[in-house]
Image: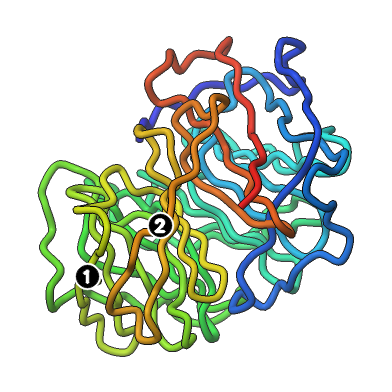
Amino acid sequence: MTRNHLRPATRPSRRALLGGAAVAALAATTGTGAAEAAPARGGTWPTQFPLPDGWLPEGITIGARPYAYLGSRANGAVYRTDLRTGEGRVLHEGGTGLAAIGLKLDRDGLLYVAGGGGGTARIVDARTGRLLHTHQLTGATDHFVNDVFFLGDRAWFTDSRDAVLYGVPRGRRGAVRALPLTGDWEQTPDVNNANGIVSTPDGHDLIVVRSTPGELYRVDRRTGRATRIRLVGAADVANGDGLVRVGRTLYVVQNRLNLVSVWHLDARAGTATLRRTITDPRFDVPATAARFGDRLYLVNARFTSPQTPETTFTAVAVDR
């Protein structure tokens, strides 16, 4: 993942096209619930919507209402799109030297934003766009705070460059908990390791994808002990990025492979069996996904394309 900090334009590109359909809501364990008015398959909501040129998107989150929130690697800004129309605006302006990688919307209307190389977790009011609090999770060198998921009374953040999870209190008060990863976890130097994160189906622990070499782990949130999940049907989940779990179905976004692999988890999340893959010609290195009704929204990070202020970006919807 790049760490460029470009200044994005505030108007969506006219070159980006709108299609027809929608997607995403967080899994039930986030407490956000599912939307009541999601369109049926083949509905008329946009299936593709534009982001501002130069946005450098990566994370996407959607709550109970049909609005997607997308972060910018360029300057930490957050863009809000109405899934019913595809129209959006900059909600939070970010700032120089900031990044917004993964992000999640809590049921109280607070956005938790992973700060990438800055090592931060920011809390933003999703209604006003106002920055409420910044937690400094790491030092300034060789860390990359990547993604976030809610479990219990904390928002759990991954660090792709260190074998640790960070538990940030939900709300602005309380101490951050650092949870070192042990057990089967082996940290590979100089590459992205821990990336996407969700809860296990039983709601007790966490599932983390290790992008390189492409493995899934169940992590005990009390001890940090990581147990590798046995994969059946494929050797790995190489380039695993964002995760979405719906019941015992786990969606793994494999960014540079331009696909989403769909896995069935056993009751204890000890084994994952490949059921199918989702591909689409509109995928252009999708990084993360969020669920709304019967669809997934994926943000095209375009890591293999020029990352300039003129580069165009979109998010797309597919049936799940």
Can the viewer see residue 290 in this picture? yes
Q: Residues within 10 Å of mark 1 (few under 14, many from 20)?
A: some
Residue type at mark 1: give it.
Answer: Arg
Nearer the observer, 27 or 10:
27
Left or right relative to 309: residue 136 = left
Question: Residue 54, image x and y in percent?
Answer: 58, 19
In the image shown, does 157 or 314 lie closer to the viewer? 314
Q: Are marks 2 and 1 in contact (CB under 8 Å)?
A: no
Q: How is the image coloured?
A: rainbow
Image quadrant where residue 87 sits = top right
Left or right: 130 as drawn, with respect to 161? right
Q: Is residue 138 visible?
A: no
97 relative position to 108: left or right: left
Disc 2 crowd, CA 10 A, few/some/many (<14, 14-19, 20+): many
Q: Amino acid at mark 2?
A: Gly
Direction from residue 214 to residue 171 in the image, left or right:
right
In the image, what residue occupies the spot 47% across and 57% down? 251
Disc 2 target residue? 196
Q: Secondary structure at mark 2?
A: strand
Label 1 belongs to which residue? 230
Q: Is residue 85 above or below residue 223?
A: above
The answer for how far apart the CA atoms under marks 2 and 1 are is 17 Å
